[in-house]
Structures are given as C-alpha cells and as structure tokens.
Image (spheres, grey):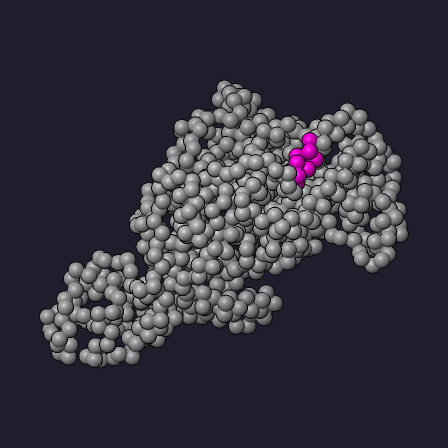
Amino acid sequence: MEQSFDLPDSTDWLDTPVSLLAPLESSLRCQVCKDFFDTPVITSCSHTFCSLCIRRCLSTEGKCPTCRSGDQELKLRRNWLVQEILEAFQNARESVLTLAKKEAARIAAGTTEDPEPPHKKRRLREDSEDQEVHGTENGPQGVRTRSQTQVVQAPAAGRDHGRTSGSLEVVEDSQDEDCEPGDGTVACPICARRMKNEAVFAHLDSCTGNSNPVANPASNNPSSFGSLRPPARQMPISPSKAPERLPAMNYSLLKDTQLRKKFRDLGIPNWGPRQLLQRRHIEWMNLWNANCDSSFPKSKRALLRELDVWERTQGGLAPTQSSLGQTAAVMAKDFDTAQWSVNHGTDFKRLIENARKKSEAQVRSTISGVKPTSEQGDMPVDRLAEPPVEDEAEGLRAARWEPQIPDNMP
Amino acid sequence: MASSVAQKRLFHEYKNLSTNPPEGITAGPVSEDDMFYWEALIEGPGGTPFEGGVFAAELKFPKDYPLSPPTMKFVSGGVWHPNVYPNGTVCISILHPPGDDPNHYEHASERWSPIQSVEKILISVMSMLAEPNDESPANVEAAKMWRERRSEYEQKVRDEVRKGLGL
Amino acid sequence: MQDDEPSLNIPSLLTLAVVSFFVLRWFLNRDDSPSSGGRPRGRGNAVDPAQVEQIIQMFPQLSVREIMWDLQRNGGSVAATTERILTGRGLETPPPSFQPQITLPSTSTQSTPTSRTPLVSKSDAQDLISRYNLKGQLATEPGPDAPTSPASASGWSQNKEERQRLLQKRRDDMILAARRKMEQKSQAQPK
C-alpha cells in the first residue's frame, strides 16, 4: 500500500507556536473523510461536507451525518465561501507551517532571544484571513483592497447555477449607468445592475455576471473589481457543456436486461448480480453528480478510474467481500481470465506453498488450542479478512497473500 | 493514489490520535499494512472499580468506513460489565448504525454516524465503563450482579483489573 | 441474474484451495491439541531457545527478536539463518506485533507455546503483561527508560517503522505505568 506518509493534518500545528491554527484547519476539513473539503456543499440543515462524502452518506442513510435530519441530494448547494477560505488557507498553509516549524525548532534549541515572531506571525496570518473573508463579503461595496485572483475565482464560477433567491429585488436599470440615480440603489459589482442596497448580498449569490459583462464605467474603480471577473470567465462549467446530472433510477421497475443496457449506455461495467449493479450505479451517480458540483470537473475517464477503485475496495472485486461476490465477478461473461491469472498467479502459488509448508509443520506441531469456535460464526467478511490464525507469522503471511489492498493489483 | 477513502480517513485518525492523544487512550493499527484492524488501550475511569486498570480492545473497520461503524471487542479476558458480551464484544449505541436498532431503546442521536470517530468511540466506552446502561444488558449475569449485589460486582471488577495487570 | 454454470477455472480452484486449506488446518489443530507436550520445535513462535543462543553466540550484534523471527520463518533452521546472515542479506526486521517471549535459555524446558499475539482472541483470561511481553521491562525501573526515546513526546513520525515503534512504546508505557501504580497502591493498603 502506497500511503503518503506526510499526510497533512490539523495536528501538524500542535507542536508549533501557532497551535491555535489547529482548530481552524480542522474546521476546514470534512467531518466524514477528514480531508480538506473537496467541493464543499451545504445541506438544508446548514452543515457542510464534501460533495462526494455527503452524497455517499445520503445514499446510504438519507440523513445528515451531523444532525441526522433527513435531507436529499437535490437540496445540496455549493458552499463557495468555505471553498474560498479553504483555498486561501491551503495556499498559505505550507509556508506558514514551515515558518512555524522553524520557529518551534528554534525555541526548542533554546535560542529564544526573539520571542516575538510567533505571535506576530499568527497575527499576520489572522489578518490576512480576515481580509480574505471580508474581501469576499464586502466585495460589492468596494472595500476589497487587494487583488486576490485565486481566491475569488471560484465564487464567480459558481454563481452560475443553483441560486434563485435574491434575484427578485433586482432593478433593471442599465440605461443611466453614468449618473448615480440617488434612489438608494447601488450597482452590483459583477453585472452592474442596480438594486437596493440590502439586496446586493442576496443578489451576489445568484449573480452570473452575464447580463452585462462590460463593467459599469461609473463604478469608478474597475480595477479593484477586475479581479472578480477575469479568471472566473475561464470557468469550466459553461452552461452549454455543463455535464448533466444523473437522475436516480428506480431499480425495481427495470428488468435485468434493461438495467444492464442502461449501464452500457452510461459506460460503466454491467456485470455482476443485481444488487451489485444497484450499488455500483449509486456510487457512479454519487461520483458523477459530485463531479458536476466541482469547479474543476474531472474527465469521465478519471471518474471511471475512481469507480474502479471503488469496485476493488467495496464493489464486486473487493477481495474481502463475501466469497459470493468474488465468484460472481469470476462467473461474469466478460470476465478477463487472463488478467485475473496474471493478477493472482503469484498469490496462488504462494498460497499452495504456504499450505504445504503449514501442513508439514502442523504434523510436527506441538501447539495446542482448538481454534475458538465462536469465531466461526462471524460474518464471512471477517473470516476472510482475518484468517483463523494461531500465530503472528501466519497472520502476516496470510495478510500478504490475500490481495486485500487494491494497490496490490496493477 | 488508489488507497480508498476509508484507508485515508483511518490514517488521519491514527495520526490525530498519535499526535494529540486523549487522556488514557492509546490506539492505532496493529500493522500499517492493514489499516482496518486496530488495537486500543483504554484506562479505567477514575472513581469507578475500573480505576487503575488498562483494557485492551481490538477494533475492526468495515471497508465502507466511515459509513458503517467498526466493531469493538475487548481482548485478553474481556471485561465484566453489563454492556460487554462475555466474549468481549462491546455493545454500545455509538457502535450501532442508525438503521438497525436491535434493542429499540437507543436514541438515533447516540448511534453511529460518519462524523463519529475512533476517539469518540473510545471515550464513549470509557464513560460506559463508569456508567453501565442496564436497559439492554449484553452480559445478563453482570447486569444482575450490578443491579442487585453492587459490592460483589465491584469486587469482581477490581479483581479482574488486578489480574489484567498481571498481579 | 448471472450464469451460474459451474465451470472449473483457476479462480474457483483458488477458492477451493483456500477453503480446503482452512478445513485441513482446523482438523490438524484439533487433533494436535491434546498431545501438546514439550516438543521444542513446532511451528509458530515456538522457536528453540538453544538455536537462538547458538546464533547469538556466532553473531552477538544481532537482536534476539530478529533471530527468532527469521528462525520462525524458515522453520527453525539454524543453517539457513546463518547462511542468510553470512551472505550479507541481513535479517528482516520483524513486524512490531511479533512478540516472542525472549527468555534466553538456561532452562531446557520450553514453556508451552507462549507469546500470544494480538491476532489471537483467546477465550480465557490473559493479563496484559504477558500479552505484550512486558515482564522484562517490568523489572527495570521507570527511570532509565524515560530518556531512551525523546521522540515519543510527539508520538508521530514520517517513518513507518518509527511510527509503529512509538505506538508500541506508548502502549507499553501505559500498561507499565498502570501496573506500577497498582503495585504501589496495594503496598500502601494491603488487603
């Protein structure tokens, strides 16, 4: 298993002078996968998760993991602000962490002649965090002072879809842009429509910037807003080629052959028993729809690869799945025998070898202890995952020849 | 990077528990080659007959963790406690998926959810040791003793704690 | 559904092999159990201490655990282990969970298969000290082992083995600390 051993984590901050950043980082991580939010979405109960994580949760349980109120996939909305904060944080993370670690090392070394930097650093950090948050919130009022292209690019991209609220109070008034109407309205910094002051925030959430792409000449400082738009225009989800979301399927209405045909149309594997087909389709739907949320959608090929990973860890190719699932894969028509033999040939040989060795050893063995029979009744999953071994060596050997971890296979 | 979500998440939890371990808890995979099999040590909570003891348990995680909860089982002799089966398996609501409620007594809010974690499980188990829930005894004998002959129960627990430490 | 034609191909053979292997093991185990006597050289962890000593005498620089691990893996062949060392391949580091009972010989009687590993869930009680083989460490005072690993404070390392070691160390420390505390307590107020 190739794990990345320097997995960044909120605890990285704990040993540094800026240990207070740990809670900040952990709140930027999804509670389900513990990773940084990937395409954060907000549920109707206002909890934020990665798009894919919450979709998986909802498809198994239909409830918000945090508060357990029922929710539906369709009600999920992108949470742009979180994504912005996260991106800003991620950009800063490495350098701040390096600084903080250096500082920690220096303190540890006892050369604390300059105790100030850590605090200063934190303040700096918080400041910039503040600014970034403010920057986006206050954008419409022109408070933004720094150009933060990167930070801003996502929200604008996202305003393209999903939001409808707040657009009601928009006052179409594009004719007399040059004069301030004096009627208490202000211009949206993105689309330059005029609207009531209070409506700007709500409108911004849904503003696509499309209605009037030319910046309002009257909004005296176009450059300060410039950062809001240009990068956003290269956004990947242009309405024309936005990937279409997959609808849920009513499996019980479909016959096997129909289902398999649908799968073929979707371009996903269609072997295996019905139950597996359903689980695969749910996973594919989750992957696909989460990808639709993403600001940087992956190619279908990449998604298929992810589905393949799923297949090997939890789906029909999962080695620890009950042997039933295993044979199902084997029995399928399109089963690739040659590939299978290649994948498992060495395992197989090792298995025979082990069995021989062990039965020999067994004959000579002096070891007592009938295997606890209570273990026998366990789920088959357990039995494969944990062969009833008596000693460590066998346990390890067993662990080795069982292709438990997907990475073992090419 | 083909390691699954579950492996990654478990690795995160492992790191978190190692760098910032909660009081009285040590946990980690038996071997990093199999992130789905952990071993944990819990200290007996103070002010209870379990005080001073250390209890070893194994945790087995399903492949779709954290969607499904792990199972937890005390090893080396088990624990004499109303909510621990004689074979050591822990019966506590946080380890039950919200879907099935074999006992019909647990609030859904106490049960497993993907935002729970190993740390939370172990902390819950610690508090379970302190306050047994005898509504749904997993070990009927222990529950009976706990209810009716408290001092005998406590003595038995104390003896087992000492035995567990090789005394 | 799917075609359930029973066809003999490699995978089904494989499944068969696994199943029959376990069945076989189970039977052999059961048959052996009553006769568990003092044959020194069985499978598993029952490595003959005399062999270990023999190798230790030849290569004092090696750790007992490594030797036991290798002996156990090659079925207790001193020759094979020696050859392995001499060819410069060195011995593999045993996995952290490999916990042989390191009782170096002197006594010729080999205790019955000791050193249960965490993978075994035994029904009968077994205390943590013997489970993790902490007897040896119990004898040493808490003082000297504190400075041996200054890194344990952080509890994390980029290195896999180091990490495993740290975990093990924290675990051992926890048990030993509890044990010492308990000892003190019972000395203070004897029953």
Asked if residue C15 is among those painted magenta in the image, a careful observer would answer: yes
Q: Position of residue A25 (x, y in %)?
A: 44, 59
Asked if residue A119 is among those painted magenta in the image, a careful observer would answer: no
Along the horizontal axis of the image, is C72 left or right of B106? right
Q: Residue at x 58, y 69 (%)?
A: A106
Q: Main secondary structure of the magenta part?
A: helix
Q: Residue at x 45, y 65 (%)?
A: A90
Along the horizontal axis of the image, is C76 left or right of A77? right
The foreground one among C108 and A165 is A165
Q: Residue at x 21, y 77 (%)?
A: A216
Quarter placement of the C terminus of chain C:
top right
Q: Quadrant of residue B43?
A: top right
Residue A58 appearing in the image: yes
The foreground one among A143 and A82 is A82
Q: Residue at x 34, y 49 (%)?
A: A247
Q: Is residue A181 above or below residue B83?
A: below
Q: Position of residue A304 (x, y in %)?
A: 47, 55
Residue A122 appearing in the image: no
Q: Position of residue C1 (x, y in %)?
A: 48, 37
The foreground one among A80 and B78 is A80
Give, as a single range, the part of the protein colored magenta. C13-23
